[in-house]
């Protein structure tokens, strides 16, 4: 008799303290998970870069008590990798347009450029917000053909803004 195994989990979630070492730890754990899922290297590298930007924003700009954790969630649905960073700050991100000499302020510009879609929404039953991005696994590339609206609630990329 053949054994039937359940499908591999396609959703993982990590909880972190709101500290700067969390940025590197989230990159490391996401990279390992994406290798386990056997995602293409270019998709994985982009996802790791973008999660780094979102976690950095949450740590740097989250004006909340230190005990409020960050949550990083990754899931594959159909042909899309979705990564979410949830923090305890109610301030929605604000996109900046930095000048050539500015040393910061490009975080969400990277997300906007490299992700197929992205956005932010307030947590429905608690304090804080979730900022997310999606990468298409089918090779349509950034802003390629496909879904133009976010899953769930919140604003899409055209209305979302950044604090870095």
Image (cartoon, rainbow, N blue to C red):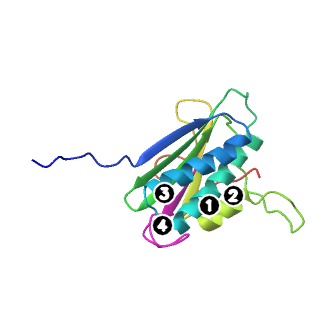
Residue that badge 1 annotates: 158
Residue that badge 3 annotates: 35
Q: Residue at x 46, y 72 (%)?
A: 139
Q: CA distance from mark 1 to mark 4?
A: 27 Å
Label the magenta part by its dominant secondary structure.
loop
As drawn, which residue projects farthest toward the right?
101
Q: Is 68 positioned to the left or the right of 2 in the image?
A: right
Q: Quadrant of residue 63?
A: top right
Q: CA distance from mark 3 to mark 4?
A: 8 Å
**Mark 1: few/some/many CA within 10 Å (<14, 14-19, 20+):** few
> Looking at the rendered structure, which numbered label has been put on residue 40?
4
SS for dot 2: helix
Q: Nearer the viewer, residue 142 or 31?
A: 31
Q: Is 145 positioned to the left or the right of 65 in the image?
A: left
Q: Residue at x 64, y 63 (%)?
A: 112
Residue 119 rendering spot, x and y as whole percentages: 58, 53
Residue 142 rendering spot, x and y as whole percentages: 56, 70
Segment tinted magenta in the rendering: 132-149
As drawn, which residue projects farthest toward the left?
1
Residue that badge 2 annotates: 108
Does the stretch in magenta take in 135? yes
Q: Quadrant of residue 128?
A: top right
**Mark 4: few/some/many CA within 10 Å (<14, 14-19, 20+):** few
Image: 105 above or below 126: below
Q: Are marks 3 and 4 in contact (CB under 8 Å)?
A: no
Q: CA distance from mark 2 to mark 1?
A: 12 Å
Give the mark, 1 or 3, whose residue is nearer the N terminus. Answer: 3
SS for dot 1: loop
Residue 57 rendering spot, x and y as whole percentages: 72, 47
Q: Are marks 1 and 3 in contact (CB under 8 Å)?
A: no
Q: CA distance from mark 4 to mark 2?
A: 23 Å
């Amino acid at each position: 008799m053949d054994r039937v195994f359940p499908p591999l989990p396609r959703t993982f979630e990590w909880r972190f303290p709101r500290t700067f070492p969390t940025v590197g730890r989230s990159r490391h754990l996401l990279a390992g998970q994406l290798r386990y899922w056997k995602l293409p290297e270019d998709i994985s590298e982009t996802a790791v870069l973008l999660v780094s930007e979102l976690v950095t924003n949450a740590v740097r700009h989250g004006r909340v008590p230190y005990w409020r954790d960050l949550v990083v969630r990754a899931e594959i649905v159909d042909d899309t990798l979705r990564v979410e960073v949830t923090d305890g700050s109610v301030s929605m991100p604000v996109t900046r347009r930095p000048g050539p000499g500015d040393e910061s302020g490009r975080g969400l510009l990277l997300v906007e450029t490299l992700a197929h879609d992205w956005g932010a929404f307030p947590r429905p039953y608690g304090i804080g917000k979730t900022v997310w991005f999606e990468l298409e696994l089918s090779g349509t590339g950034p802003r390629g053909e496909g879904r133009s609206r976010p899953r769930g609630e919140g604003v899409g990329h055209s209305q979302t803004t950044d604090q870095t």
